[in-house]
Amino acid sequence: MRIDSLQLFQFRNYKDVTIQFNPEIIVLHGTNGAGKTNILESIYVGTIGKSHRTNDTSDMLMFNAEEAGIVVKFEKKDTPQKVNIKLFRQGPKDIRLNDTKISQKELIGTLNTVIFCPEDLQLIKGTPSGRRRFLDMEISQTSATYYHQLMQYNRLLQQRNAILKEYRGKQNIPLEEWDLQLADMASFIVKKRLESLKKINLLIDLMNRKLTGGLENLTIGYEQPYMDNGSLEYTKEGFYECIKAALPQDRHRMTTSVGPHRDDLRFFSDAMDLKKFGSQGQQRTAVLSLKLSELEFIKSEVGEYPVLLLDDVLSELDESRRANLLQFIHKRIQTFITTTDIHDFKDLKSVQFISCEGGKVQYGQP
């Protein structure tokens, strides 16, 4: 999979620009605030229909503009395709694949990308929601059914929580219909997560061994804080009983305490919990291994590597981790890298340098 060109219209600081890309490594360089990350953001929007930086569409529009456009031309399994997205300050997005209008959920999985930002280095130490989001987006890019079920589950969850608030202080709450549906979808989501995690664990351990010279094993555990003794629930019947048992607590807190929206991931180096006891170096190596395993996981599911987006992450890695990452992607994965310093890339072959300054781009090294 590779991206051939990108056209931006009134997107962030780009008024009207078209950029052609080579098949391998593209280094986007320039000063801080020049617009390098905006290019990666636009590609990511072309992947899932929304930004990884903001939930407000208007943030992506040029100042005083009422609309913006993104056109990504790419090849998937040697077949040319085009994603065209129009963003509006007021109103829904217009998403088209090869000139046919589609929904956002239909876009997921069309153009596969993996994005790696400095914030991802906090994945292990960060919040459970960040780890769930990582796993959900990885699976969604390879399974449209999972994404659809996840969206339905979240809508049902919001509706159940609204009922809990509406019936605050009352004993009899009409939740039977919601609970049965919620249990069914929770079972599907957790089963798919566990199935995918089994594959990811094989890959992440292999990647971590490469990065550490075989010195450390790395595994990801799945955790349900509402279950006792570390057991896992993944059946429809089991979830239904857990949801019913938690009703007194849910009634008091006016929120749903059981389900995949509460689950978490734990990272272990051998038997050591990396969040609690891992060094910063071990945590960063684990996250890097996770990102590399994400590339391999998507390849195993869709048949080819996704496009890799590295947003100023190399400056956050030490020399050995940086070298390992570049060695892994070189001549294998089309990769977009933002940086303020091109020194690390001057010795690499098949690199395209693009300068980004003031909403304009220029090809070549400075």
Image (cartoon, helix red, strand yellow):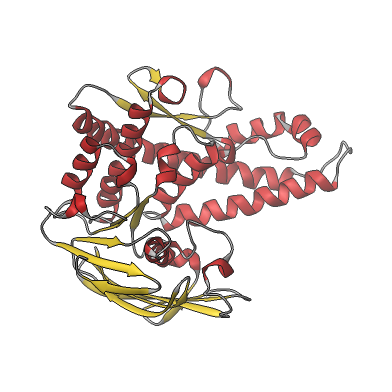
Tell me the quarter of the picture where residue 208 sits. Answer: top left
Location of the C terminus by quadrant is bottom left
Name the residue at 71% across, 28% down: 245
Q: Which x, y percent locates residue 134?
A: 44, 45
Vertical placement of 256 versus 270: above or below? below
Q: Is residue 261 visible?
A: yes
**Left or right: where does residue 324 sit relative to residue 337?**
left
Tell me the quarter of the picture where residue 81 sits. Answer: bottom left
Name the residue at 52% across, 68% down: 60
Vertical placement of 167 versus 48: above or below? above
Name the residue at 37% across, 41% down: 196
Vertical placement of 242 versus 290: above or below? above
150 or 350: which is nearer to us?
A: 350
**Left or right: where does residue 165 sit relative to residue 208?**
right
Location of the N terminus by quadrant is bottom left
Q: Which x, y percent locates residue 154?
A: 61, 51
298 or 25: which is nearer to us?
A: 25
Name the residue at 68% across, 43% down: 179
The residue furthest right is 170
Q: Is residue 174 visible?
A: no
Q: Which x, y percent locates residue 194?
A: 42, 36
Q: Which x, y percent locates residue 79?
A: 23, 72
10 or 292: which is nearer to us?
A: 10
Q: In the rendered picture of this protein, how many numbered marks are placed on residues?
A: 0
